Image (cartoon, grey):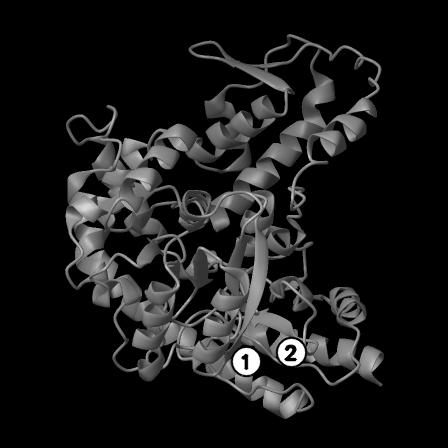
Amino acid sequence: MQERSSVGELAEQLRRELDRYSPGGKLPSSRALVERFRVSPVTVSRALAQLAAEGLVVTRPGAGAFRAQARTAPAPAGDTSWQEVALSADGAADLVPRSVDASGVLVSLAAPPPGVIEFNGGYLHPSLQPERAMAAALSRAGRRPGAWGRPPMEGLPELREWFARSIGGSVTTAEVLVTAGGQSALTTALRALAPPGAPVLVESPTYPGMLAIARAAGLRPVPVPVDADGVRPALLADAFRATGAPAFVCQPLFQNPTGAVLAPERRAEVLRIAREAGAFVVEDDFVRRLVHEDAGPLPRPLAADDPDGVVVHVSSLTKATSPSFRVSALAARGPVLERLRAIQVVDTFFVPRPLQEAALELVGSPAWPRHLRAVSAELKARRDAMTGALALHLPQLALPHIPSGGYHLWPRLPDGTDESALTSAALRAGVALAPGRPYFSAEPPAAHVRLSFAAVAGTGEIAEGVRRLRTACDEVLG
């Protein structure tokens, strides 16, 4: 973290001094900058690269860095208003509008302003990421013979085998495809299973990114309510009968956002209902590796107990590593596997081989189980810190379920609360929240917020964030 800060500070200092040099003028040598600012050569190199990316300097190997020529005046803006007609007319005949609303996804992806505590994040804080292990894995991977060649379209056999073992049951290497992150895998699955205009059953509430995928593909998300034991089978059966949907998308383990785990007696029932409906179950097993220390044994993925090919399974390494470590898997059996493979090849060709090789190096290293144990303990500590702080300072926020895995809580707000007003007030108080409305595909039964405890620096920041949230609640709730 200190190195990143130094790079930014040096780049800013050099940016302020550029006026000393005429266009094309040479900047001091890297050695001179190292001595003057007392930083490492790597910091100087990265700072100059940042300025080069901004178009302020030009670097020439062996010659040094030079101030870039003055930029020419930008061309007058064109008239793009014609696109409003073109894009709208294109979808006029669609059964379901295919406009893309990414707002629910951007809430958990966008970095908050400086000084704002990130209770809306969807990934591990850098202090929880295995940065050294990933860097070492990537370095080793780059030296592997053929590491920069074209990989098999389905993915490296060794990585597919590792994912198959992780899923368990009778899943084989041949039934696994390596994909570029869970979002990409879910997109491929929904495109393979449902034609535009079709209904698709989803948990309610559910992950906004999945709702965005469905709507962008012209699908109609139909909600099926979730309780503390996961999706309710009777309502799932009713929804299949009413809609004829070809697929049901679910997160049986530590569901996002409720944290629910599908109860043992419901697992076989869900598969039976889907099989009788002639439909697929898309299992998004997104946080199996973010289990808390006190969770106990985990249930197997639904795919491990599915000999008939009902389940299309998605699992990923991203949540347990870094948002940029986008390696995941799609697993399916039967003719649907070929359709999944064809769509993925058309869309992305393949996942870059160096990233696949790095994934193999990472999960095969002694650092991997150590990392998972450390994250498991830290997430439990953070969850306990947040639940304790909420109980003490904000008892009016109901927490009917405290999960033993994942990275967030799902408090219910008092009846009549304006989520948007609370989110805005919280941001003014210095804490970013994820409002509950985007997690529902239809009218929500109550107001909620999602509070992440993984994207912050530690338990101290959690305590301060809850204090700021109380200030916002006092303003909005009275």
Which residue corresponds to the image point at 72% horizontal and 18% vertical from the top-left? 20
The image quadrant where one finds the C terminus is bottom right
Query: What's under tag 2, amino acid-wise?
Result: Val
Q: Nearer the viewer, residue 353 or 453?
A: 353
Mark 2 residue element: helix
Q: Would you identify the image quadrant in which residue 379 lies?
A: bottom left
Which residue corresponds to the image point at 76% horizontal and 69% vertical from the top-left? 429
Q: Position of residue 462 (x, y in %)?
A: 57, 74
Q: Is residue 400 above or below residue 103?
A: below
Q: Position of residue 377 (x, y in %)?
A: 35, 75
Q: Position of residue 284 (x, y in %)?
A: 40, 60
Query: What's under tag 1, amino acid-wise?
Result: Met
Q: Would you identify the image quadrant in which residue 149 lies?
A: top left
Q: Which residue is mark 2?
A: 466
Q: Nearer the viewer, residue 304 or 293?
A: 304
Q: Nearer the viewer, residue 349 or 358?
A: 349
Q: Is residue 20 above or below residue 460?
A: above
Mark 1 residue element: helix
Count neighbours of disc 1 (C-alpha within 10 A) and say few if under 14, some if 14 to 19, many if 20 or more.
Answer: many
Q: Nearer the viewer, residue 8 or 291?
A: 291
Is any part of residue 264 visible from this angle? yes
Of the two numbered discs 2 and 1 on the same chain, state the one appearing first in sequence: 1
Q: Is residue 14 above or below residue 111?
A: above
Q: Is residue 406 left or right of residue 355?
A: right
Which residue corresponds to the image point at 59% horizontal and 71% vertical from the top-left? 451
Instruction: Mark 2 and mark 1 in contact? Answer it, CB < 8 Å.
Output: yes
Q: Which residue is mark 1?
A: 386
Which residue corresponds to the image point at 72% horizontal and 36% vertical from the top-left? 92
Q: Is residue 266 left or right of residue 112?
A: left
